[in-house]
């Protein structure tokens, strides 16, 4: 079954404690991206990756890091989380030739206290 | 700045009725893709329909169709014979030439029995 898997689904943590949200896809997609969803703002792109070792900033990259060492994985790292990063996060993937995210993960609800 | 505007924060219709969700966008690019995504209460993000800007013919997927007016930069979604399962947030989005998606703030659609 084609899947984009995010973990954890929910996390409550405190300011400054480093965390990683994992994202893995089983469709051999080149393109992967991270979004955050906030009420009234829709989704905003954080980072995206066109292929292994190729990453680029989206619209709201501040406070986040990513890596793409393997094709299937695209973790999102918050080195020093702050309350304004409390949000719902989505990972997505597709074949590069499509030019848009076809498959989304189920989302990760992060609360930073 | 490239933007997407969904002017209807919330709409509700009776089951089996037809409903149209509006979307306008602003871009200086000539070639781009437009999308409607659906996010049901389960919060999954599901691609509903897409439209290539260079195509004059409006896209259709079963009960979902779009009215694409390129000159007016308008991209509305029509849902025919609405069903209870259509209750969801609907997001309009377009993708820039560099694969970045720009999203609207969303329209909450409620289908009443």
Image (cartoon, coloured by chain):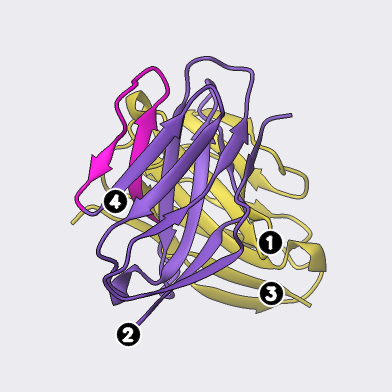
Residue A20: x percent and y percent?
Answer: 60, 59
Q: Kindly state the secondary structure of the residue where label 4 is placed.
A: strand
Which of the 4 image quarters holds residue A111? bottom right
- Most foreground residue, B33 or B23: B23
Q: Nearer the viewer, mark 3 or mark 4?
A: 4
Residue at x-position 30% and y-position 73%: B85
Residue at x-position 32% and y-position 85%: B113
The answer to whether mark 4 and mark 2 are in CB contact below 8 A is: no
Left or right placement of residue A5 versus residue A85 in this view: left
Q: Is residue B1 magenta?
A: no
Chain for disc number 4: B
Colour of chain B, in one word, is purple
Chain for disc number 3: A
Q: Kindly state the secondary structure of the residue where label 3 is placed.
A: strand
Q: Nearer the viewer, mark 1 or mark 2?
A: 2
Q: Nearer the viewer, mark 1 or mark 4?
A: 4
Chain for disc number 2: B
The circle on residue A12 is none
Check disc 4 and report the residue beneath it.
B64
The yellow-coloured chain is labelled A
Check disc 2 and report the residue beneath it.
B113
The range drawn in magenta is: B45-62
Label 4: how many Cα within 10 Å (few below 14, some 14–19, many 20+): some
- Most foreground residue, B42 or B20: B20
Chain for disc number 1: A
Check disc 1 and report the residue beneath it.
A40
Residue A25: x percent and y percent?
Answer: 34, 49
Distance from Cα at disc 3 to Cα at disc 1: 18 Å
Label 2: how many Cα within 10 Å (few below 14, some 14–19, many 20+): few
**Mark 3 or mark 1: whose residue is earlier in sequence:** 1
């Amino acid at each position: 079954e084609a899947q984009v898997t995010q973990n954890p689904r929910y996390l409550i943590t405190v300011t400054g404690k480093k965390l990683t949200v994992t994202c893995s896809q089983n469709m051999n997609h080149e393109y992967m991206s991270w979004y955050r969803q906030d009420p009234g703002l829709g989704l905003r792109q954080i980072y995206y990756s066109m292929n292994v070792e190729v990453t680029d900033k989206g619209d709201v990259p501040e406070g986040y890091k990513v890596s793409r060492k393997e094709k299937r994985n695209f973790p999102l790292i918050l080195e020093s989380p702050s309350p304004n990063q409390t949000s719902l996060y989505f990972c997505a993937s597709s074949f590069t030739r499509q030019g848009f995210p076809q498959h989304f993960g189920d989302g990760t609800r992060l609360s930073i206290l | 700045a490239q933007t997407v505007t969904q002017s209807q924060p919330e709409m509700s219709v009776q089951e089996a009725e037809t409903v149209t969700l509006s979307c306008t966008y602003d871009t200086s690019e000539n070639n781009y893709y437009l999308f409607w995504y659906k996010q049901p209460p389960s919060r999954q993000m599901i691609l509903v329909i897409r439209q290539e800007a260079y195509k004059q013919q409006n896209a259709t997927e079963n009960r979902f169709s779009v009215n694409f007016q390129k000159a007016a930069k308008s991209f509305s979604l029509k849902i025919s014979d609405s069903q209870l399962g259509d209750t969801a947030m609907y997001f309009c989005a377009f993708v820039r030439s560099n694969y970045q998606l720009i999203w609207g703030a969303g329209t909450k659609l409620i289908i009443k029995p």
